[in-house]
């Protein structure tokens, strides 16, 4: 979607563009079950040019900060769920995985490192406890309006989806029943799960 209008007395064209992007994540090894001593690696690389899903063009975003946050949830059978960032040890290899604890739970901010004009984060998660977990990613939408890209246009980013391991199989079956039971008023299927960068796994001893 894009529109250009002539708004000022001199008749100069004012351009406005709206973009839709997708950020890619990988989780390895891509298993559905891990043990307490295993390290789960998560990586994301943002290229200086991103594909705009609206126009099909590659857009130069330079080092724009999408302010990616993560949620780690542990599902508790017959009880509910809890935020679970504190149930893992972390190893940073590129960028930082910064956890914030609140009275209502926790969340994490992904701080990308800048390497060769790319933004990159890579961190390892080592489970402390057993259970069924779900990691997903989100952005604060109010950070995505009136952004300054290196182009002569007013830009709004209307949507940024996240996809883990290209969305091939992120073990939605492990948490499908939990979502239906504990979030019955929120329509949520496997594609919705994939578009949040969702990945579910079980940790055993």
Image (tube, grey):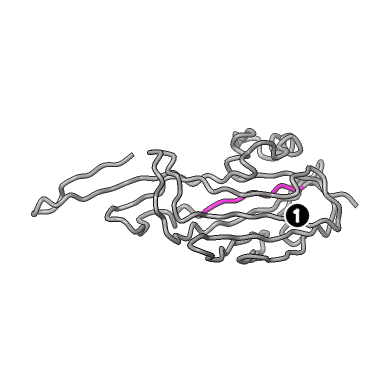
Q: Residue furthest right?
A: 205
Q: Residue furthest left?
A: 10
Residue at 83% over, 60% down: 128
Residue 184 screen position, x and y as percent: 65, 35
Q: Secondary structure at mark 1?
A: strand
What secondary structure prevails in the magenta region?
Answer: strand
Q: Is residue 90 left or right of residue 185?
A: right
**Quick one: label 1, few (<14), some, or many (20+) residues within 10 Å?**
some
Tell me which segment is drawn in magenta. Answer: 133-139
Q: Is residue 17 magenta?
A: no
Residue 156 screen position, x and y as percent: 37, 50
Q: Is residue 6 left or right of residue 29?
A: left
Residue 39 screen position, x and y as percent: 78, 57
Q: As displayed, is residue 168 above or below residue 19?
A: above
The quarter of the picture where residue 176 lies is: top right
Residue at 54% over, 65% down: 115
Q: 9 or 182: which is nearer to us?
A: 9
The quarter of the picture where residue 37 lies is: bottom right
- Quadrant where the N terminus is found in the figure: top left
Q: As displayed, is residue 114 above or below residue 173?
A: below
Q: 6 or 92: which is nearer to us?
A: 92
Residue at 73% over, 56% down: 84
Judging by the rendered image, the residue that carries numbered circle 1 is 40
The quarter of the picture where residue 125 lies is: bottom right
Residue at 61% over, 45% down: 197
Q: 134 or 82: which is nearer to us?
A: 134
């Amino acid at each position: 979607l894009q529109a250009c209008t002539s708004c000022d007395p001199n008749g100069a064209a004012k351009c406005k563009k709206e973009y839709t992007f997708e950020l890619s994540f990988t989780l390895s090894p891509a298993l559905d079950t891990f043990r307490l001593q295993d390290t789960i690696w998560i990586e994301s690389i943002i290229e200086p040019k991103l594909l705009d899903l609206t126009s099909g063009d590659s857009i130069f975003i330079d080092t724009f900060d999408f302010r990616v946050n993560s949620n780690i949830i542990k599902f508790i059978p017959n009880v509910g769920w809890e935020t679970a960032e504190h149930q893992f040890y972390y190893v940073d290899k590129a960028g930082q995985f910064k956890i914030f604890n609140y009275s209502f739970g926790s969340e994490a901010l992904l701080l990308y490192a800048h390497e060769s004009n790319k933004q990159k984060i890579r961190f390892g998660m080592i489970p402390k406890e057993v259970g069924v977990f779900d990691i997903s990613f989100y952005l604060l939408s109010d950070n995505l309006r009136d952004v300054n890209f290196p182009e002569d246009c007013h830009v709004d980013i209307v949507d940024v989806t996240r996809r883990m391991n290209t969305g091939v199989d992120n073990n939605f079956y492990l948490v499908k029943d939990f979502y239906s039971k504990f979030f019955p008023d929120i329509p949520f299927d496997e594609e919705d799960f994939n578009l949040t960068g969702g990945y579910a796994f079980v940790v055993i001893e």
